[in-house]
Amino acid sequence: MNLDVLAPGLLTTVQDAGRDGARALGIGLAGAVDGYSLAVANRLVGNPTTAAALEITLSGPRLRFRRAATIAICGADIDARSDELTLPGWRPIHLRARSTLTLGACRRGARAYLAIAGGIDVPRVMGSRSTDLRGGFGGHAGRALRAGDGLSVGARNAPHAGANALSIAPWWIDPEPDLAFADSIAVRVLPGRDATAPADALHAQEFVVAASSDRQGLRLHGPPLHLADRRECISEPVVPGTVQLPPDGQPIVLLADAQTVGGYPRIGHVITADLPRLAQRRSGQRLRFIPVDHVQAARANAQQRARLARIALAISARPFHG
Amino acid sequence: MPSANAPAVASIESLGDGALLLRLGETIDATSNRRVHAIAAALQAQKPDWLIELTPAYASLAVHVDVTALHGDDPLASVRDWLTQWLAHARIDTASAIAQSIEIPVLYGGDAGPDFDALAVHANLRATELIDLHAGGDYTVAMLGFAPGFPYLLGLDPRLHAPRHPTPRARVAAGSVGIGGAQTGIYPFAGPGGWQLIGRTPLRLFAASRDSPSLLRPGDRVRFVAIDAARFAALDEHSR
């Protein structure tokens, strides 16, 4: 153990890029809700983009590092302190041995990602280190962190292992345009199987994020939507990004902990590139849906992957103090 | 030449920007479901480079695509074309799908099945008749979902069809055997659930630490065997 959990925060879980390959057994992906921020945080500390990190929800943990560590905090803008110093996000930070890292409230956004050089070393379960909260497996003991837990960090050649002082890189990565923290944002959506009446109802109004939202889904509130055809639905596969419409007319956008099959009508699918923006919505914030076609969606997704690749290149070319 | 029992895929739809959905029907029926599992097995054997995994459901099959392995303006469209061609030419035999047969011991009624008595009244059956009807069925795992390892079973006798509870129970015990509409299933974990509970199995439906985490796989055949409380206790001890 080289990381002690002194206080767990509201909902802090070990997550990586998610668990493929077991949906046929009813096992969803899990993984970081905001996969973009996880990838950048990992790159900043020299990890593969898919290494396991901590996903922090709204209010963060207090952690004690027994050994020196290089960390990065991405995603939500979170109050972070160590040695009485305020730590900024989106850049590598070197913590000396026996440091305490205190993560407070998310000031903007809902989920922060703490990557540590070497990655969080928990056993892989079915190919992934992600916590499956519903199944109670993966991550750390299949659950959110608690006070008193100890975590191991993977071994790696730490480039700053000699420096026994806190240091903060003077450069950072700009999260725009892949994340957006404004009170009202737009996300792009592909058509679903079920049409609303009128057909553009999903695009014609703003929705407010409900407090009951969680890793499984973003629950939205607005004037109730109606279906063009109230067919009897049998359960069919769903994916993160699927916009479901339950009988109350209030849409739910499924996120990383989406179940594998669902019986509600599906009125759209948010494109992959905009899932990070959804992950950062807080209760009371608003969002709009903008219709796109498959060519536009594929282009937006490819552009986001290209930005991530450029960020990775830029980071690898950058000395820590450059 | 398409084989004699080539599956009738009604449509190939997109499911967001990373998956396609093959639709074989609109109802919960054994024929559509058999076709789902046969196509899944054939596609799995084919192993196209871009295939991540498959999610079989009652009458549809999601094909999850690694779009980064593909080129072009609309990577999913090229997979759709490939699937259309493949379905027209592949030999997919609905009779040959590999499935295991599993016996599931169940303690019916009492604390293990808190809705058993009410269901017997609802169905106008004696307790022994209810058990015989449920345990006498020949079931197929149509799909897994709702929770890891939760099987939706086809083959429930129509006399046992029963509506879900209007308000789900806050806590259903792990291993509970329930009836929801025309389906029967088993809760792998303790948690909320709205189905009518008629019994409980001591078997562990899901354990992430096992080599094969889910006891049941899509397409498997299932039979229930009634056991008494002593046998339940012995098996329960054994599966811990």
Image (tube, rainbow, N blue to C red):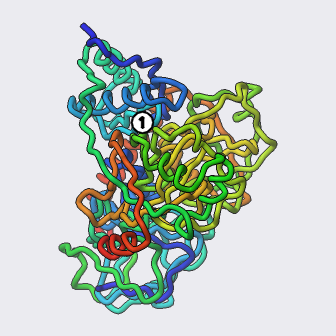
On the image, numbered disc 1 is attached to which residue?
B18
- Asked if residue B234 lies left or right of residue A154, the reply is right
- Report whether residue A78 is seen: yes
Between residue A124 and residue B227, name the one nearer to us: B227
For the view shown, which residue lies furthest in the left direction?
Answer: A157
Between residue B79 and residue B99, name the one nearer to us: B99
Residue B42, position as x, y percentages in the image? 25, 28
- Read off the chain for label 1: B
- Which element is circle 1 on? loop
Q: What is the number of callouts on the image?
A: 1
Query: For residue B197, what is the image quadrant?
Result: bottom right
Above/below status of B16 relative to A93: above
Tell me the kind of residue under disc 1. Answer: Gly
Residue A18, position as x, y percentages in the image? 38, 55
What's the residue at 81%, 42% (across, down)?
Answer: A223
For the view shown, which residue lies furthest in the right direction?
Answer: A223
What's the residue at 56%, 50% (across, down)?
Answer: B179
Quadrant of the frame with the N terminus of chain B: top left
What's the residue at 63%, 46% (across, down)?
Answer: B162
Between residue B21 and residue B149, name the one nearer to us: B149
Above/below status of B184 relative to B228: above
- Report whether residue A169 is seen: no
Residue A227, position as x, y percentages in the image? 72, 31
What's the residue at 23%, 60% (across, down)?
Answer: B211
Query: For residue B138, what is the image quadrant?
Result: top left
Above/below status of A62 relative to A181: below
Residue B148, position as x, y percentages in the image? 42, 56
- Asked if residue B182 lies left or right of residue B150, the reply is right
Q: Residues within 10 Å of mark 1 (few under 14, many from 20)?
A: many
Quadrant of the frame with the C terminus of chain B: bottom left
